[in-house]
Amino acid sequence: MKEELNRYKRARIVEEASRLFYERGFTGTTLDAIAERLEVTKPFIYQFFDGKHAILAAVVDREITRVIDLLDAAQVRAGSVTGQLYYFVDTWVRENIEFRMIAVIFWQEHHHFSPETQRDTSRLQKVLNRRLTALIERGIASGEFDVDNPRLAAYALTGLAQWIPRWYRPEGEFAADEVADYFARQALRIVGAPPPAAVAAS
């Protein structure tokens, strides 16, 4: 129970700090502001984090880990590799839209990452690219994908959705469903997959 409560408290700190990083930027956010938003004291925050950089590292870790988890979930789905890739990109785009605040923080504040956070970020990105490359290789082996370089295709796919949080607005001209479907279809084009209409039947 105590460990679960501590995880909840830590998550709440990360959640509220994320909002402040998004609203004010990393340099404009103080630990005092985070404590005030949470209605706690700074010593409470220090129970879980050494400082502001450690909180930013937790935000970054959660963002990349979330994408890796989405990919893992897609790969255990029954059906074709084409369907799994479509599902992954479709879900990733939707998550990027829903949690665009976190994604924006990731790309805007990367120059504030500590050397340790940069190493951890690089490691997690490599994990994501390796697993996505493996998925593409399975698609090639099954005859569903037609692409010369799986690793380059994986890099293209990871870059596909990362800019969406910068321009997407709920009140804009594109609905989330439309954006997710469009980008998932483009992902299939990148790997030379069959026409998207075939995905629904897979």
Image (tube, rainbow, N blue to C red):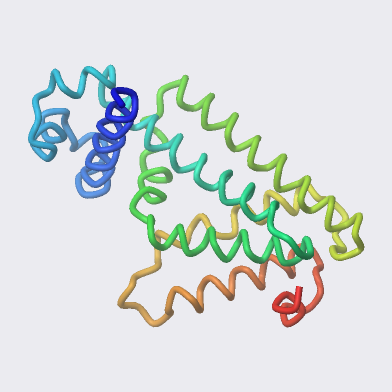
Residue depicted at x 26% and y 26%: 52
Task: Describe residue 59's horizontal placement relative to residue 75 as left or right.
Answer: left
Q: Residue 166, how many percent across, how many down?
A: 40, 60
- At a point 48% along the width and 58% down the height, the residue shown is 163
Q: Nearer the viewer, residue 65 or 106?
A: 65
Q: What is the tally of numbered marks visible in this picture?
A: 0
43 displayed left or right of 163:
left
Q: Nearer the viewer, residue 59 or 152?
A: 59
Taking 72 as reference, is 199 left or right?
A: right
On screen, 130 above or below 154? Answer: above
Q: Which residue is painted at 50% across and 45% down in the image?
A: 66
Is 185 displayed left or right of 150 in the figure?
left
Q: Where does residue 142 sit, x and y in percent of width and height?
A: 90, 59
Quadrant in which the C terminus is drawn: bottom right
When the figure is inspected, residue 100 is found, relative to residue 60, above or below; the finding is below
Quarter of the figure that contains the N terminus: top left
The x and y percentages for residue 10 are 29, 30
In the depicted structure, whether residue 49 falls above or below residue 198: above
Residue 6 quadrant: top left
* Picture residue at 54% right of the left edge, 62% below the top: 91
Image-quadrant location for residue 32: top left
Q: Residue furthest front?
A: 1
Where is residue 149 drawn, in percent x and y? Answer: 84, 51
